[in-house]
């Protein structure tokens, strides 16, 4: 019963994460199913100390979607991605006032980051691009991309915690 409630509350948003990375509905559906099986099998490994439950779920889906992309040889980098599309997080059934407040806070914190570092973070975490792919796409050295992402994540954490 609790697992069904978890699925109902999170599946739409997690499907959106998988679909955003994979760009194919059938693959996103498979990844979502595989992810929930992984959640079922590793539920005991979850630690609230390391992050919010939704962050843990998104991480599982994101990693599985990226693995699927790499196995298939297809990359999200082949698609034109606007920043508006990067930031367009689908609501789904679980959308509520708290979720809206969380997304608003995330948007405000992202807005405080310069354009290219923000785009590097979004390409890495929403679309699963590697540092090398981001560097090629943005025309900067890979070390720059790594620094941007590391510093931007630190800024996001401080902003969201504060």
Image: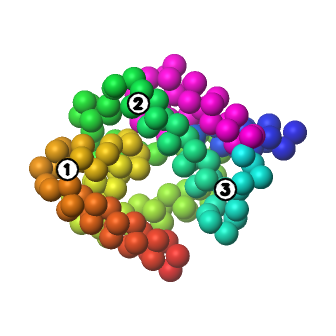
**Outermost residue to the bottom:** 162
Tag 1 secondary structure: helix
Which of the two discs, 2 and 1, labels the residue nearer the N terminus?
A: 2
Q: Which residue is mark 3?
A: 53
Q: Position of residue 52 (x, y in %)?
A: 64, 61
Query: Which class describes the residues within 10 Å of circle 3: few (<14), some (14-19), or many (20+)?
Result: few
Of discs 2 and 3, which sits in the foreground? 2
Q: Which mark is residue 69?
A: 2
Residue 146, by quadrant, is bottom left
Mark found first going from the N terminus, 2 or 3 = 3
Q: Is residue 20 visible?
A: no
Classify 10 Å Cα crowding around label 2: few (below 14), some (14-19), many (20 and above): some
Residue indicated by mark 1: 135
**Position of 129 relative to 73 (above/below):** below
Secondary structure, mark 3, is: helix
Q: Is residue 158 above or below residue 149?
A: below
The mark found on residue 74 in the picture is none
Which portion, as a residue range, is magenta? 15-41
Residue at left offset 75%, top offset 40%: 40
Q: Residue at x 32, y 33 (%)?
A: 76
């Amino acid at each position: 019963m609790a697992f069904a409630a978890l699925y109902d509350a999170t599946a739409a948003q997690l499907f959106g994460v998988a679909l955003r990375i994979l760009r194919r509905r059938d693959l996103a559906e498979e990844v979502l199913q595989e992810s929930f099986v992984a959640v079922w099998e590793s539920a005991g490994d979850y630690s609230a100390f390391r992050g919010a439950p939704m962050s843990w779920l998104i991480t599982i889906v994101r990693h599985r979607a990226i693995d699927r992309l790499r196995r298939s040889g297809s990359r999200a980098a082949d698609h034109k991605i606007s920043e508006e599309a990067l930031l367009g997080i689908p609501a789904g059934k679980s959308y509520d006032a708290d979720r809206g407040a969380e997304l608003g806070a995330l948007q405000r914190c992202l807005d405080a980051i310069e354009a290219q570092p923000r785009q590097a973070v979004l390409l890495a975490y929403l679309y699963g691009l590697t540092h090398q792919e981001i560097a090629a796409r943005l025309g900067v050295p890979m070390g720059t991309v790594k620094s941007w992402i590391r510093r931007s994540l630190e800024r996001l954490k401080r902003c969201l915690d504060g």
